[in-house]
Image: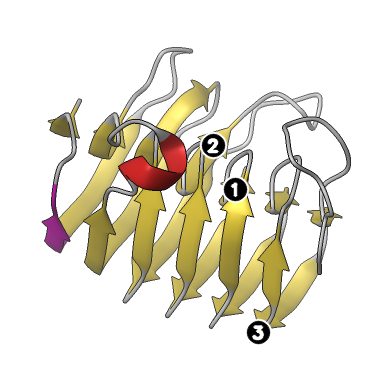
Amino acid sequence: IDGNRSERGGPKPVALKNCRHITIRDITIRNAPNYNVSLLGCDYVNIDGVTILNGYCDGIDPDCCHHVRIANCFVESWDDAIVLKTSFALGRSRSTENVTVSNCVLTTACNAIKLGTESSGDFKSITFNNCTVFARPELWQRYPTSGVSIESVDGGDIDRVIVSNIVMADARSPIFI
């Protein structure tokens, strides 16, 4: 999927709302002007082998989703690479829970792995494991803001989050909580 854009602003290449039993596998998204893979209120999601190149917004965004597996992905995004959210976009508060992110390679000018900023619901049982984070200053003109960012600014609780075996280079703040 080629968004055919050279700046931020436009449609989301993959946007699913209130869907169940989703598999997104072995696709490449490039030049996307908005969130590359946006999931809102989706459950039982398997994202495997997705490549995102030259994304101008977030790479993969599970928002108010349950039972999500993200694995073996390469994400190159100006904005956050993989960010879990609990926004109020469904018109009500809903948690994001039972999420595993593993074996991903991430490069960004913002946050590589992020939980929050949009956090009106709770985050429960989240695992980030075996991922690599690196800088692309020749592409983004700056280094990543953080390698791992865990934020609750809207009142949501954060419970049972595991971050392990994350390798990163050149992040301005390797861990931000």
The residue tagged 1 is 61
Q: Earlier in the sequence, mark 3 or mark 2?
A: 3
From which residue to which does the magenta span run?
Answer: 164-169
Residue 23, quarter of the rendered image: bottom right
- The rendered magenta stretch, by its main secondary structure, is classed as strand
Q: Residues within 10 Å of mark 3 (few under 14, many from 20)?
A: some
Residue depicted at 64% across the width and 86% down the height: 26
Dot 2: few (<14), some (14–19), or many (≥20) neighbours within 10 Å?
many
Q: Residue at x 65, y 84 (%)?
A: 25
Query: Marks 1 and 2, how far apart in space?
Result: 7 Å
Q: Residue furthest bottom?
A: 26
Residue 87: x percent and y percent?
A: 63, 27
Magenta highlight on residue 21: no
- Give x and y (percent) for residue 172: 17, 29
What residue would you read off at disc 2?
85
Residue under circle 3? 25
Provide residue 78's location: percent of width, then percent of height: 51, 39
Residue 135 vertical position relative to residue 95 in the rendered view, above or below: below
